[in-house]
Amino acid sequence: MMGAPPCSCDTFVSVGADGRASLVRLALAADRDELVVTRAGGGLFATTSLPLDALRRVSYGFGALDASKATFHADFVEAPWRCFALCTAADEPADVYLGDTDEQAVAWVLGLSALLHALGRLDRPLSPSALLWLRARMKLRLLAANERRSAPAQLANVVRQASASRLREG
């Protein structure tokens, strides 16, 4: 699942550069040359196509939040590892997509990264291990901030808890 292209269609919450949230459906076109974005709003649906060769990068986590240049609601700050942005130009604000699950966001980021690499837009695609390590670091950083600890102290605490749990099971 990790290295596979994104599934054919998934629903996300999207926040545009204007800070407005909406429900969107992302789908790869059958020929995989474009991404189809269907946005719901006021009972109407607007569909736009984004050619994959127009994409310059996929930003993940806090990088996605920075790429958007928008103000976000709490869900984006509480779970940045479920966020990604599709960037078409360096100076242009990007929409941010928030997945329902970690796996959904990871699958789309890895899949789109692989597609961009195949199109020659990236020197190398993101590796699953690099992306999962980045996700773990974001979760650790937020957990440490919530518990008012340094990230190294929080990591030591997590390791101690895991070790104690394993000893009880063993």
Image (cartoon, helix red, strand yellow):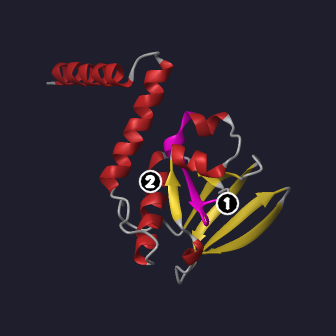
Residue 31 in the figure: left or right of residue 159: right
Frontmost residue, 85 versus 37: 85
Q: Quadrant of residue 70?
A: top right
Residue 122 in the figure: left or right of residue 165: right
**Per the image, is 83 magenta?**
yes
Label 1 and label 2: CA atoms lie apart by: 23 Å
**Per the image, is 88 magenta?**
yes
Frontmost residue, 14 versus 86: 86
Q: Residues within 10 Å of mark 1 (few under 14, many from 20)?
A: few
Frontmost residue, 43 versus 150: 150
* Residue lying at 61% horizontally and 57% vertically, measured from the top left: 11
* Residue lying at 43% horizontally and 77% vertically, measured from the top left: 120
For disc 2, the marked residue is: 106
SS category of the residue bearing label 2: helix
Q: Position of residue 166 (x, y in %)?
A: 19, 25
Marker disc for residue 7: none
Q: Please determine whether, in this image, residue 154 is positioned above or below residue 105.
A: above
Highlighted range, magenta:
78-92
- The residue lying furthest to the left in this view is 170
Residue 82 in the figure: left or right of residue 67: left
What kind of residue is marked 2?
Answer: Val
Q: Position of residue 80 (x, y in %)?
A: 53, 41
- The residue lying furthest to the right in this view is 42
What kind of residue is marked 1?
Answer: Glu
Question: Number of callouts in the render?
Answer: 2
SS category of the residue bearing label 1: loop
- The residue lying furthest to the front in this view is 91
Nearer to us of marks 1 and 2 is: 1
Q: Position of residue 56 (x, y in %)?
A: 54, 67
For disc 1, the marked residue is: 92
